[in-house]
C-alpha cells in the first residue's frame, strides 16, 4: 500500500535519488580506472601542434600527449593512420570536444584499427613520439601534419544520447530520461525543477503545507509562524 504521508514519501524519494547518485559515481569511478596511466598523466614539457608545425627540428623525438576528435582513419598494410583534430585536454586527458580545434595531426598506430569503431567525431587521446611533419592536401591547401608514433592510446566512450541530461550543463534535451526517472527532471514531480514544488523559487514554486520555511528561497509555504 502506498504511503500517503508527504514527509515519508519525500524521504523515500530522496533515498532513491541518493542511491542512484552513488551508483552513477561508482560507474564513473570504474570507467576512470580503465584509462591508462600514461593518458591521465601530462608530460613534463607540453608541446602544441602549432609548435611542432613551426619547428620540426626542435621538437622531433619529443614525447607528446595529444587528443581530439577523429577526422579520418587510413589502414595501411602494417599500421593505421588516424587523422585527428586536436583539442584541449582535461585533467584526465580527455579531449574537451566542445572547445575550438587546435590544428590537425596524424596518429600512427601499429596494427589494424577498425574504422567502424574509430569513427568520425569519436574522442581519442594518444601518447607517443613526434617523428616529423608531413605536408598533405586538405582540399586545395597543403597542410603540415605533425606525425606521432603512438605508444599508448585511449578511445573515449561515446557521450550520452541527445536529451540524456536535459537543459542543464549545456546538453540538449528536455529532461533526464533514464537517469532520474520516475522522479522527473532532477528529482521529479515530487520535488520539481531542481528540488521541486515543495521548496519554492530557485528550488521550486512551492506548495502550501509542505514548505515550513516559507520566504523567497523556499517557496510560499504556510507563511509566517503565528504566535
Image (spheres, grey):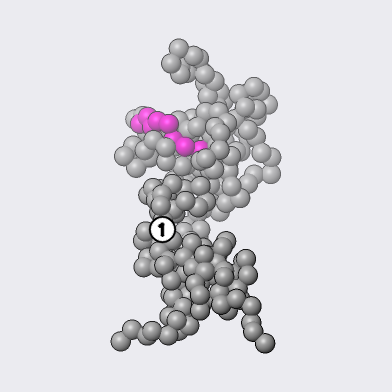
- Taking the spot 54% from the left edge, 20% from the top edge, the residue there is 144
Q: Secondary structure at mark 1?
A: loop
Tell me if residue 68 is in the magenta stretch.
Answer: yes
Depth check, front residue: 43 or 178: 178
Of 184 and 132, nearer the camera is 184
Specify the quadrant of the image occupied by residue 19. bottom left
> Where is mark 1, residue-wise?
176
Query: x and y percent of residue 14 in the render?
Result: 48, 75
Q: Residue at 51% across / 40% down in the picture?
A: 97
Residue 181 x/y as whole percent = 37, 65
Q: Is residue 133 above or below residue 10?
A: above
Q: Quadrant of residue 52?
A: top right
Above or below, comparing residue 194 to residue 226 in the picture: above
Position of 57 relative to 37 (above/below)? above
Q: Residues within 10 Å of mark 1 (few under 14, many from 20)?
A: many
Could you tell me which residue is drawn at 43 percent across and 61 percent down? 185
Residue range in magenta is 67-75
Is residue 184 shown to the viewer in this render? yes
Tell me the quarter of the image containing the C terminus.
bottom right
Residue 162 shown left or right of residue 46 in the figure: left
Taking depth in this image into account, of 155 and 99 the one nearest to the observer is 99
Secondary structure character of the magenta stretch overall: strand
Residue 103 appears at what percent x and percent y? 55, 28
Q: Is residue 199 left or right of residue 138?
A: right
In the rendered image, residue 28 lying in the magenta stretch gets the answer no
Quadrant location, the N terminus: bottom left
**Residue for point 48% across, 33% down:** 84
In the image, taking residue 48 as reference, residue 204 lies left or right, namely left
Amino acid at each position: 500500500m502506498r504511503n500517503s504521508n508527504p514527509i515519508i514519501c519525500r524521504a523515500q524519494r530522496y533515498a532513491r535519488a541518493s542511491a542512484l547518485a552513488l551508483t552513477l559515481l561508482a560507474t564513473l569511478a570504474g570507467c576512470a580506472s580503465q584509462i591508462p596511466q600514461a593518458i591521465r598523466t601530462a608530460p613534463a614539457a607540453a608541446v602544441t601542434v602549432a609548435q611542432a608545425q613551426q619547428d620540426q627540428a626542435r621538437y622531433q623525438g619529443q614525447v607528446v600527449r595529444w587528443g581530439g576528435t577523429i577526422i579520418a582513419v587510413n589502414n595501411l598494410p602494417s599500421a593505421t593512420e588516424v587523422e585527428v583534430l586536436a583539442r584541449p585536454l582535461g585533467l584526465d586527458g580527455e579531449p574537451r570536444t566542445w572547445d575550438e580545434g587546435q590544428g590537425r595531426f596524424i596518429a600512427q598506430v601499429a596494427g589494424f584499427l577498425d574504422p567502424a569503431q574509430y569513427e568520425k567525431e569519436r574522442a581519442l587521446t594518444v601518447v607517443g613520439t613526434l617523428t616529423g611533419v608531413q605536408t598533405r592536401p586538405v582540399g586545395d591547401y597543403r597542410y603540415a601534419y605533425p606525425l606521432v608514433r603512438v605508444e599508448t592510446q585511449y578511445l573515449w566512450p561515446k557521450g550520452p544520447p541527445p536529451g540524456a541530461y536535459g537543459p542543464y550543463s549545456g546538453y540538449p534535451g528536455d529532461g533526464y530520461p533514464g537517469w532520474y526517472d520516475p522522479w522527473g527532471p532532477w528529482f521529479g514531480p515530487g520535488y520539481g525543477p531542481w528540488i521541486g514544488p515543495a521548496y519554492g523559487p530557485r528550488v521550486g514554486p512551492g506548495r502550501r503545507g509542505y514548505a515550513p520555511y516559507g520566504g523567497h528561497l523556499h517557496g510560499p509555504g504556510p507563511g509566517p509562524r503565528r504566535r
